[in-house]
Each structure stands twice: as structure tokens, then as C-alpha cells.
Image: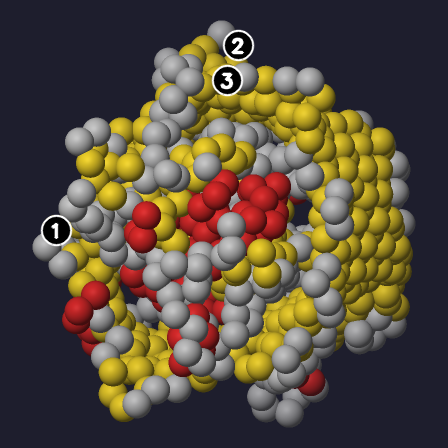
């Protein structure tokens, strides 16, 4: 017999980076022989929490099998007499096996289907019958294949090509996700605000954001969320502050360990959404102490800006017309991340960053056709972010963690193109979250308790805004002042308890049960700090004469004609919600069934809602390579503070009219009870999912169809008396079909490793409201002429988030010996169509109608590329350099929606990031 060793295959570079703390063990003299052949093969979007104590490898492998849902077969003699060092934390199957086998002398190879074979090289021999391994087989048939979930880890986030400064930037390339038509436009090239996203055609404010298990949604007024560098409120009807976000926290992606997006077949433990769930987890301490410093810069000199030819002179002077362009800016980001062991059982990670943008814009001051010049504004837009996570290992069965988060975005602005008073607007959030994990022999108990605050604050130079007719008469600008100080805030307390039962058999049927409870309490308020006063002055005499005969026409020749006042006031509301859920993963042969039910009650709408979640997966050929999947689910959406506020604010207004001699003419006190009495159902979306997952060599191919039928969307309407109220008339229908190819294992060419993902998707969405902010939009009963027939205005194409066709290709190639990663992403987006009033009329025997016609946007193809290099500088010091070029070929399209506005997509842009890790 000739002894021959099977060649060990190189461990994936990502695994090595994620398991750097193993070096500490090696430095202590612990031997290690293992191979991560199947690591990429075993990574799924779902991870599990493992608590494997040091000791017998037999017990450890059984514990691993119980948590992962895999089962054991083959010769168990291979494990006898061997010990594991143990580990704990949340990992994929491949990562967990890497940790499990450290110091055991065992490696593993890929077996049939989704199975692995543990190998001891000392007993591998080759005889006449071939290779004899005497292996232990671990097969993963108990882990169901799923669709509708995708995950990014920390390394992928760091090295990805394209924008990655905000959480929603990371969703580029997801076939279920659509961005606003205004995303990536020339007007917001310097803004620091995160993009909003729509998932399967649903309203962008109807997604659920979660950080370390804590809800991170802003439910004050998230629909009115476009950037507001002017007109922060409308004081005439005192709407809530605009320019907020559906996210409470503007978290720096450098802080994230992973981001998981659930877009369909969403598990029953998640509620409060119509679109999808975006769950992010902070980096946790893994045994390695480090400190990382990074600096990133972007500037207009490195970019290409495209504008309408009519604005060539203004652009050359660095001007922006009505904020349609941002020709001059400087963006910088400073980031510190680190990890530190505090005691043998306690460790922490932290991230602190400041992202800042300075840019200039200008506004034309005109009244009618008279131009009074421009007012230039130098904006400062800043986002401060801090978070820390503490992990405490109390004992073998109990883990306690705490997450602390803080974010503050603040920027200045001018009240509007008329009133030139300055303001500062901020969005601030802070939160603390504690999670307890208890591992028993029966299963895993998770308890999460969190508290967070989110607020939007407007601080203006003045609470009075004024119009002087005398100034206009004398050829001067007649407007001045600003809109005062306003604060809106929500405080939330949440308790979540989740029980995950270990898998067990009843006859030939395997069950895995999960159940949970959620309790939430919220306190929200809207406050006007000081009286907001509007003063309208008119001349005492017609024609604006010199009434006091002092030789000049000035303010002494005016009188206060109308004074509008919004009184200082505060509206406060408390609410609570409760949720219960239960699910069972059932496996019978080649069939996996998911049966779940969720019940939610909220005190604001006073509704009890039931959400069934079901799916079935069939392993067609019993080889774990071809799976057919179907699902039927219901999701209930969120409710918003705006409903309550709109029923109160109008009663805070008063109007005073005066005579020319200054005496009071009359007082109007508004007692408008619009919105006050409404009874709403909770909006819901019914989902049907059909898909097939096919393994092709190193690639998984997924074809998926998702239909969403959404009903009871909240809209505005009017009574016969002209008062507004809310109802549930809104509805939408969206079909999404997507095809995705994604590598399970990297392709190896020479010394390089390449992972790739290709997605093509088509989405068609119909909605009976025009705006993407349905709870502030009405279903128009007005009829218009469109494409040769008369229809209701609300039947026109959807105004935003309506890009029908999208292709995305991303690649990531690592050069391990050079410590270099080259990443690329290509995006192809169909332009989409909106309808616009042509300002022409159509008449027939039934009446006169406005003519609407389509505006078709061109397709846009962009290539983004980046080079990330981490050279060794000194002992235990690693450098960092990343150069990113977005839209390499400088392709752009005209996104203008009328002849009076100018909007182009961004051209080529470049950023540079440098840093060091100690």
C-alpha cells in the first residue's frame, strides 16, 4: 500500500479574514490542520447562533448538527479521542465548521448534494478499490432552500463598487428594489441624505428597518421625505416638517457586520411592512483587538457635471438654478472603527464617523417677469454617527449584548426663494438595545429590550415672515423672515421575546417550531415653540402715496392689512401595539413546509390583524440541486403620526384683518375639524410567490415571480362641505419577475478568486393614486384625455419608483498575494414613463379635458469600478487604499419632467479613501 494524501484546497480568503482571531490561538502553540473546501458551498442567507463548549468533538459535532439542522451518518469512530476548542456566535454552517475543527487535525471535503465529509489525513489511504476515507458524513437536507432573502457581509460591504455611504446604497442590484427617479440626479450629487427604496412596488415608507433586533423606523412623517433646503414647512396649513426619512438612524456601513434583505416569503417574526424588511447587524467582538482609521474625499473637480445648454453660462460661473444642479462641492468622511477585549468575558466594538458636504447653490429672485437677482447659499450638510456594541459571555449557556446608537444629520438652508431667512434643520436619533440569548437543551431563547428617540427639528432665524408692498413699489425686494421653530419627535420602547425550538421528529416528520411576542409603546409629539406670524403690509392710499408728507414713501405710509398667526402649541399622543407569532418548519421526505401565523394589534387604528405566512419547497430530484418553491403570504403595513397631527394643527391658526387706521376689522379663528374623525383599516398586501432554484456547478440560479395585491392604502378625500378626511381607497398591484445567477464558490483563475452575481428583473406596478405619498394624496375624480380616451387622472402611470426593467452585474476579484480586491458593478435601468399635462385641451360632446401625454426617459447604463488595497506597512499595521470611479463611461440621461426644470443624471465621479488598521 502506498500512502497518498488528498490535496487540501485553499480556504476562501473571506473566511480567513472573518476568523482572524484564530491567530491568537496559533500564537499560543495550538496546532491546526483543516480545510474550508465547502465554505462557499455552505454559506446561506440564514445564519445560526452556536454555543459550542470546549471538549469532546463527538458532543460538539452533535451540537452543531442540532443547531444547523444537518444530520449525521457514517463512521463516528473518526471523532473519538478528539477535542474541540469550542466557539460561540452567529455564523453560517461553513464558518461554524471552520471554527469547530480548529486543532482537531480534521479537514473536510465537499460530498454529494449539500453534504460534507470530515477527513483525517492520517487514515486516508489508496488501495486497489480507490480512496478509502472512513468518513463521517454530514448532510444538510434539513436546511430548507429559500428565496426572498439576500445577505451582504462586512467584507462585501467594504469592497463593493458604487455608492456605499448609506444603508440603502447597499441594495443596488437587488431585483426587488427600485430607487426614486430623483436618485442620482445632478441636483442631489452633494447631499448626505440616504436614498429611499421601494420593494415590489410598495410605498418607500412601508419598509421595516431593523438594527440588532431593534426597530429603526421613523413613523412621524416619512412619506414627505425629499431633501428640504428650502420650504421646510407650509405655514398656511401647518403641515408636518418635510425632508425627514423612513429611517431613524443614518448608520455608517463601516459599522455593519451584515445586512439581510427579506423581500418575499418573509418569516413570521417580522411585521409592520408592505414592502420588505432590511435587517442590519453591528459588528461584534470576535477576539481580535484593532483600531482602524479612514478618510474619504469626493469633490466636484474630479467629477463630470452635465447641464442643459441654456444654463452653460450659469454653470461656468458655478451657479445653480433653483437647486437643479450642484456644480461646486466637497464631500468628506472621517471614520474610526475598533474592537477591544475588556475582560475574559466582555468585549466591545465601536464606530464613530462624520460625513460632511459643503456646496453652493443659488435661487432666482423674481416676481412675475421681473428679476431681482440671485441669492447664493453655501450649504453645510453633516451626518454624525456613533455606535457601540458590548458582548458579554456570562456562562456556557447565557450571552448578553448591548448596542448603543446615535445619529444626527443637520444642514442649513433658506426659507424659500422669497423669504430669505436662514434655518438649520436636523434629524437626530439615539437608542439603546439589550439582547439576551439563552441556550437550553430544548432550544434558543432570545429576549430583546430597546428604547430609542427620533426627532426632526427646525430652528429658524425668525418666527415672523413679512411682505412690504412699499419695498415692491420702490423696486426693492419685498419679502423677509422665516418660519420659526418646530419640533416633532417619537420615543419608542420595545420588548421582543423569541423561542426557537430545536428540531425534533414525530415519526418520519421533522419539526422546527418558533414562537414569539412583541410589545411596543410609543410617545409622539409635534410642537410649535413660538408663535409663527405672517405680516402682510399694504399702502394706506391707493397707488402708494406719501401719506405723511415727509417727502418719501416708506413704511410709515403702510398699514398692517393681514396678520396670520400659528400659536405656540404642542400636540402629544401615546400608543401601543402587541404582536404574537408562531411558525413550524416541517420536513417530510423531499418536501419542506413553512406554516406561520402572526397577529398584531395597534391602538392608533384599533385593529387586530392576522397575517398568515406559508410556503412549500420541493427537492425535485432528491439531490438538493433542483428546488421548486411556492408561497402565499399577507403583510400588514405601518401607521403614521401624521394621521393624528393633521386632525389638530389647523385649529392653531388665526387670521386678523385691520383697517387703514390700524383698528381691528375682524378675526377669523379656524375651527377646521378636517381629518378629526376617521376610522381606518390597516393597509395590507397579499403576496403570491413562485420560484425555482437550480444548482449549476459553482453557481445557484434562481427564477422568481412575485405578485403583490395591496389594499386599504390610506388616502385623502373631501366631504361635501370641503373638509378633508382619510379613507382606505388606495390600492395597487405589482408583478415582479427576476432571474439571478450567483456564485456559491469563487471561480479560481491562477492565484485569483472571483465571486459574481447577475440579476435581471422586470416590474410592472399599477396604483390608483398619483403620488408616492399616498396618505397625503387623494384619488382624483378628475377626468383627463390620455392615449385617445378619457380616463380618471389617478389612472395615469405611477409618478415615481416606476423603473420597469433593471439589469445588474457585480463581480469581485481578489488577488490574495497582492492583498488587492478589484470590484465592478454594471447597472442597466430602463428609463420609465410618466404622464404630463400638455397644457392643451380636448373637447367632445361630454366636456372639456386636459390632454396628458407620456414622457419617456432614456435607458441608463453605468459601470462602477473600485480597487481596494490593504498593504502591510509595519508589524501589526495594515494600510488601506480604495479608489472608486462611478459611471466610468460618463453616461447620463435627461430626467427633466417639464421644459421649466432641468435635471440630468450624474456623470462620472471619483472618490479616494485612505486609512490604517492597527
Which secondary structure, mark 1?
strand
Can you give x and y, in whole percent of width and height, for residue 106 in the image? 39, 54
Which label number is shown at residue 846? 2
Which secondary structure, mark 3?
loop
Please tell me whether residue 300 is drawn above or below residue 823 in the rendered image: below
Foreground of the two, 507 or 533: 507
Residue that label 3 marks: 590
Q: Nearer the viewer, mark 2 or mark 1?
A: 1
Quadrant the C terminus occupies: bottom left
Between the C-alphas of marks 3 and 2, the distance is 62 Å
Foreground of the two, 3 or 260: 3
Q: Is residue 562 in view?
A: no
Can you give x and y, in whole percent of width and height, for residue 569 in the image? 86, 67
Q: Is residue 462 left or right of residue 910?
A: right
Q: Nearer the viewer, mark 3 or mark 1?
A: 3
Q: Is residue 655 left or right of residue 136?
A: right
Residue that label 1 marks: 749
Q: Residue at x 80, y 75 (%)?
A: 530
Q: Residues within 10 Å of mark 3 (few under 14, many from 20)?
A: some
Can you give x and y, in whole percent of width and height, for residue 318 in the image? 27, 75
User: How is the model colour-coded?
Assistant: secondary structure
Between the C-alphas of marks 2 and 1, the distance is 70 Å
First in sequence: mark 3 vs mark 1: 3
Amino acid at each position: 500500500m502506498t500512502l497518498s494524501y488528498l490535496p487540501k484546497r485553499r480556504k476562501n480568503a473571506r473566511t480567513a479574514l472573518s476568523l482572524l482571531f484564530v491567530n491568537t490561538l496559533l500564537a499560543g502553540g495550538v496546532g491546526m490542520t483543516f480545510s474550508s473546501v465547502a465554505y462557499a458551498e455552505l454559506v446561506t442567507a440564514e445564519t445560526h447562533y452556536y454555543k459550542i463548549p470546549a471538549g469532546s468533538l463527538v458532543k460538539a459535532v452533535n451540537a452543531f448538527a442540532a443547531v444547523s439542522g444537518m444530520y449525521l451518518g457514517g463512521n463516528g469512530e473518526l471523532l473519538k479521542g478528539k477535542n474541540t476548542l469550542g466557539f460561540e456566535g452567529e455564523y453560517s454552517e461553513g464558518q461554524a465548521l471552520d471554527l469547530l475543527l480548529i486543532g482537531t487535525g480534521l479537514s473536510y471535503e465537499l460530498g454529494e448534494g449539500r453534504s460534507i465529509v470530515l477527513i483525517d489525513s492520517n487514515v486516508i489511504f489508496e488501495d486497489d478499490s480507490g480512496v478509502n476515507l472512513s468518513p463521517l458524513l454530514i448532510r444538510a437536507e434539513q436546511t430548507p432552500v429559500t428565496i426572498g432573502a439576500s445577505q451582504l457581509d462586512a467584507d462585501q460591504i467594504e469592497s463593493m463598487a458604487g455608492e456605499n455611504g448609506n444603508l440603502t446604497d447597499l441594495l443596488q442590484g437587488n431585483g426587488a428594489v427600485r430607487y426614486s427617479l430623483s436618485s442620482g440626479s445632478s441636483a442631489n450629487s452633494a447631499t448626505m441624505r440616504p436614498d429611499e427604496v421601494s420593494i415590489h412596488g410598495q410605498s418607500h415608507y412601508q419598509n421595516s428597518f431593523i438594527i440588532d433586533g431593534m426597530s429603526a423606523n421613523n413613523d412621524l412623517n416619512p412619506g414627505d421625505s425629499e431633501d428640504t433646503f428650502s420650504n421646510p414647512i407650509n405655514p398656511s396649513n401647518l403641515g408636518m416638517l418635510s425632508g425627514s426619512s423612513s429611517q431613524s438612524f443614518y448608520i455608517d456601513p463601516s459599522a455593519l457586520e451584515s445586512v439581510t434583505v427579506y423581500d418575499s416569503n418573509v418569516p413570521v417574526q417580522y411585521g409592520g411592512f408592505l414592502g420588505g424588511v432590511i435587517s442590519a447587524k453591528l459588528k461584534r467582538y470576535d477576539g481580535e483587538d484593532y483600531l482602524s482609521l479612514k478618510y474619504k474625499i469626493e469633490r466636484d473637480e474630479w467629477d463630470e457635471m452635465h447641464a442643459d445648454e441654456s444654463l452653460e453660462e450659469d454653470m461656468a460661473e458655478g451657479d445653480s438654478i433653483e437647486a437643479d444642479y450642484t456644480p461646486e462641492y466637497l464631500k468628506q468622511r472621517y471614520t474610526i472603527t475598533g474592537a477591544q477585549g475588556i475582560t475574559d468575558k466582555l468585549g466591545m466594538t465601536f464606530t464613530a464617523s462624520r460625513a460632511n458636504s459643503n456646496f453652493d447653490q443659488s435661487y432666482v429672485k423674481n416676481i412675475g417677469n421681473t428679476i431681482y437677482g440671485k441669492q447664493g447659499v453655501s450649504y453645510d450638510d453633516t451626518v454624525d454617527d456613533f455606535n457601540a456594541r458590548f458582548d458579554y459571555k456570562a456562562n456556557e449557556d447565557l450571552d448578553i449584548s448591548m448596542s448603543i446608537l446615535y445619529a444626527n444629520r443637520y444642514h442649513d438652508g433658506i426659507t424659500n426663494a422669497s423669504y430669505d431667512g436662514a434655518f438649520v434643520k436636523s434629524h437626530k436619533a439615539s437608542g439603546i438595545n439589550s439582547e439576551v440569548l439563552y441556550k437550553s437543551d430544548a432550544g434558543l431563547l432570545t429576549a430583546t429590550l430597546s428604547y430609542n428617540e427620533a426627532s426632526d427639528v427646525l430652528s429658524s432665524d425668525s418666527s415672523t415672515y413679512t411682505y412690504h408692498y412699499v419695498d415692491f413699489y420702490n423696486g426693492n425686494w419685498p419679502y423677509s423672515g422665516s418660519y420659526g421653530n418646530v419640533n416633532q419627535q417619537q420615543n419608542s420602547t420595545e420588548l421582543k421575546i423569541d423561542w426557537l425550538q430545536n428540531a425534533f421528529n414525530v415519526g418520519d416528520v421533522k419539526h422546527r417550531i418558533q414562537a414569539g411576542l412583541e410589545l411596543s409603546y410609543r410617545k409622539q409629539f409635534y410642537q410649535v415653540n413660538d408663535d409663527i406670524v405672517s405680516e402682510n403690509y399694504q399702502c394706506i392710499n391707493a397707488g402708494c402715496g406719501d401719506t405723511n408728507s415727509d417727502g418719501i414713501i416708506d413704511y410709515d405710509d403702510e398699514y398692517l392689512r393681514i396678520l396670520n398667526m400659528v400659536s405656540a402649541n404642542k400636540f402629544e399622543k401615546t400608543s401601543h401595539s402587541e404582536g404574537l407569532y408562531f411558525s413550524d418548519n416541517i420536513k417530510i421526505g423531499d418536501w419542506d413546509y413553512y406554516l406561520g401565523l402572526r397577529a398584531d394589534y395597534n391602538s392608533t387604528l384599533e385593529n387586530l390583524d392576522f397575517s398568515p405566512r406559508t410556503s412549500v419547497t420541493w427537492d425535485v430530484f432528491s439531490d438538493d440541486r433542483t428546488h421548486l418553491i411556492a408561497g402565499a403570504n399577507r403583510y400588514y403595513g405601518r401607521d403614521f403620526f401624521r394621521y393624528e397631527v393633521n386632525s389638530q394643527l389647523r385649529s392653531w391658526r388665526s387670521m386678523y384683518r385691520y383697517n387703514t387706521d390700524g383698528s381691528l376689522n375682524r378675526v377669523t379663528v379656524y375651527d377646521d375639524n378636517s381629518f378629526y374623525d376617521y376610522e381606518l383599516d390597516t393597509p395590507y398586501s397579499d403576496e403570491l410567490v413562485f420560484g425555482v432554484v437550480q444548482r449549476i456547478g459553482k453557481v445557484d440560479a434562481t427564477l422568481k415571480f412575485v405578485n403583490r395585491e395591496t389594499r386599504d392604502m390610506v388616502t385623502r378625500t373631501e366631504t361635501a362641505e370641503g373638509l378633508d378626511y382619510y379613507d382606505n381607497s388606495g390600492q395597487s398591484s405589482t408583478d415582479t419577475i427576476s432571474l439571478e445567477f450567483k456564485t456559491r464558490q469563487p471561480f479560481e483563475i491562477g492565484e485569483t478568486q472571483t465571486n459574481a452575481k447577475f440579476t435581471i428583473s422586470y416590474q410592472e406596478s399599477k396604483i390608483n393614486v398619483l403620488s408616492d405619498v399616498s396618505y397625503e394624496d387623494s384619488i382624483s375624480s378628475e377626468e383627463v384625455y390620455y392615449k385617445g380616451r378619457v380616463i380618471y387622472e389617478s389612472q395615469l402611470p405611477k409618478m415615481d419608483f416606476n423603473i420597469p426593467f433593471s439589469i445588474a452585474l457585480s463581480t469581485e476579484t481578489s488577488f490574495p498575494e497582492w492583498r488587492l480586491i478589484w470590484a465592478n458593478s454594471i447597472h442597466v435601468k430602463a428609463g420609465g414613463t410618466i404622464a404630463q399635462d400638455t397644457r392643451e385641451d380636448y373637447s367632445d360632446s361630454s366636456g372639456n379635458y386636459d390632454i396628458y401625454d407620456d414622457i419617456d426617459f432614456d435607458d441608463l447604463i453605468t459601470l462602477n469600478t473600485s480597487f481596494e488595497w490593504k498593504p502591510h506597512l509595519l508589524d501589526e499595521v495594515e494600510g488601506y487604499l480604495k479608489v472608486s470611479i462611478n459611471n466610468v463611461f460618463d453616461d447620463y440621461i435627461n430626467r427633466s419632467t417639464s421644459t421649466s426644470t432641468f435635471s440630468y443624471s450624474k456623470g462620472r465621479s471619483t472618490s479616494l479613501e485612505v486609512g490604517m488598521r492597527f
